[in-house]
Image (cartoon, rainbow, N blue to C red):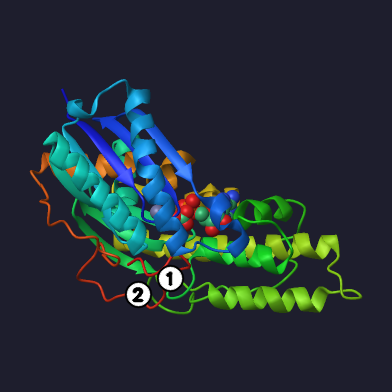
């Protein structure tokens, strides 16, 4: 029987624990902190770390109960050891070390981005190598996934992550947070061709992306559309639709180039909150010339199952960590690629 693996995640603003046996998600618990951070307009690292300390044991207890197993049944304990907010990562790693010391189960430190990038193997059994686009509020990169520990970064954002741009645009237009779903809803009644917004970096070779200039262009479009100091409803919808079209087209063109760079990729997979956007998803699927994999949203956003899965892949390779496992706030998946210039609102991730 496949080993029973606990996965723990606490690198950003979700505390999560899940138990997997092979590709079977026996239980998965996610406790979001979004209410705690809402009034600050972003994740406050110190508040996040304290909340993780309070929630890690409760989430683990709930995951064990939901699975109907005891701590002593676990064959391994996998934990996000970076990259992310250092206080949260430390809370998770220390908690996992305590569990490992108490149960004698092996400890396995997992790269959070590897968790996202290996999810298509959990959900669809994707075969190496495949192309992956991570696209969320904190991540944006194209990866060629070659093995559980082998990733080549083909490109990524040099400034904001796309989800961050959706959130900022929503704020500029007086729409609620998180901005992505609000902008998408508004865009339904708008005209995507109403405003000629830029398609950033399309003139540059390769797969790098940039979203901060697009946000500034939205600010200008808003100011030009004001009537007596107020933004008419139709103009707001048109700006949302035009912005969404610019993001979708830019991501799709870069995806087309990334696919050309990986002729042997077995599939193209997306993950991250922005992959929930219907227009973005359709544009990406439109340029995809091989199987297009989009895991269910609950497994695209931060969760414990992806950490348990990635931990399971490492466990199978014989990887074990000791009590000297260190939290790593920065931990690029591709150590050969030059660091990206930007970082995203969730702090430097890769
Ligand atoms: O993956 P995620 O839940 O968390 C991390 O950033 O790690 O992604 C959240 C981001 C937010 O910026 C949110 O606005 C964006 O994903 N998002 C969307 C949609 N749903 C969530 N962006 C565009 N369209 C959506 N439907
Ligand atoms: Zn994440």
Placement of 252 over or under 94, stated as above or below: below
Look at 44% across and 65% down and name the residue there.
254
Placement of 25 over or under 141, stated as above or below: above
Is any atom of residue 125 visible in this view? yes
Look at 87% across and 75% down and name the residue there.
229
Element assignment for label 1: loop
Look at 73% across and 54% down and name the residue there.
186
Dot 1 alpha-carbon crowd within 10 angstroms: few under 14, some 14 to 19, many 20 or more: many
**Looking at the image, is mark 1 or mark 2 earlier in the sequence?**
1
Residue 59: where, in percent of width, then height?
38, 37
Q: Nearer the viewer, residue 46 or 148?
A: 46
Q: Nearer the viewer, residue 217 or 29?
A: 29
Question: Mark 2 sits on what residue?
Answer: 340
Image quadrant where one finds the C terminus: bottom left
Which disc number belongs to residue 157? 1
Q: Nearer the viewer, residue 303 or 184?
A: 303
Look at 86% across and 65% down and name the residue there.
232
Placement of 203 over or under 90, stated as above or below: below
Residue at the far top in the pictured view: 68
Placement of 217 over or under 189, stated as above or below: below
Instruction: Work out how far the residue at label 1 is from the one at label 2, CA to CA, in angstroms.
Output: 7 Å
Which disc number belongs to residue 207? none
Total marks shown come to: 2
Is any atom of residue 302 visible in this view? no
Residue 201: where, in percent of width, then height?
48, 77
Contact (CB < 8 A) between labels 1 and 2?
yes
Residue 73: where, in percent of width, then height?
19, 25
Element assignment for label 2: loop
Q: Is residue 325 left or right of residue 21?
A: left
Picture quadrant of residue 262: bottom left
Dot 2 alpha-carbon crowd within 10 angstroms: few under 14, some 14 to 19, many 20 or more: some
């Amino acid at each position: 029987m496949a080993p029973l693996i606990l996965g723990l995640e606490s690198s950003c603003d979700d505390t999560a624990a899940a138990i997997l046996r092979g590709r079977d998600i026996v239980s998965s618990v996610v406790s979001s902190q979004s209410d705690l951070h809402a009034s600050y307009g972003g994740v406050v690292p110190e508040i996040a770390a304290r909340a993780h300390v309070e929630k890690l044991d409760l989430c683990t207890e709930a995951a064990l109960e939901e699975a109907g197993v005891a701590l002593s049944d676990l064959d391994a304990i996998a934990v996000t050891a970076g990259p992310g907010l250092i206080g949260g990562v430390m809370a998770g790693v220390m908690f996992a070390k305590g569990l490992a010391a108490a149960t004698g189960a092996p400890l396995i430190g997992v790269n959070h981005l590897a968790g996202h990038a290996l999810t298509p193997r959990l959900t669809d059994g994707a075969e190496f190598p495949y192309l992956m686009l991570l696209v969320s509020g904190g991540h944006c990169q194209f990866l060629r996934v070659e093995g559980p520990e082998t990733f080549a970064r083909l490109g990524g954002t040099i400034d904001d992550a796309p989800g961050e741009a959706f959130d900022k645009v929503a704020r500029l237009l007086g729409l609620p947070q998180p901005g992505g779903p609000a902008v998408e809803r508004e865009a339904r009644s708008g005209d995507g061709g109403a405003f000629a917004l830029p398609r950033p970096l399309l003139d540059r070779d390769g797969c790098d992306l940039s979203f901060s200039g697009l946000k500034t262009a939205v600010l200008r479009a808003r100011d030009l559309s004001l009537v007596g100091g107020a933004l008419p409803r139709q103009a707001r919808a048109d700006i949302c639709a035009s912005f969404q079209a610019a993001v979708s087209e830019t991501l799709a063109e870069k995806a087309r180039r990334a696919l050309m760079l990986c002729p042997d990729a077995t599939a193209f997979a997306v993950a991250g909150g922005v992959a929930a956007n219907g227009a973005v998803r359709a544009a990406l699927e439109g340029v995809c010339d091989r199987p297009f994999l989009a895991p269910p949203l609950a497994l695209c956003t931060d969760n414990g199952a992806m950490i348990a899965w990635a931990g399971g892949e490492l466990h199978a390779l014989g990887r074990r960590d000791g009590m000297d496992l260190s939290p790593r706030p920065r931990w690029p998946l591709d150590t050969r690629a030059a660091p990206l210039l930007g970082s995203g609102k969730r702090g430097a991730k890769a």
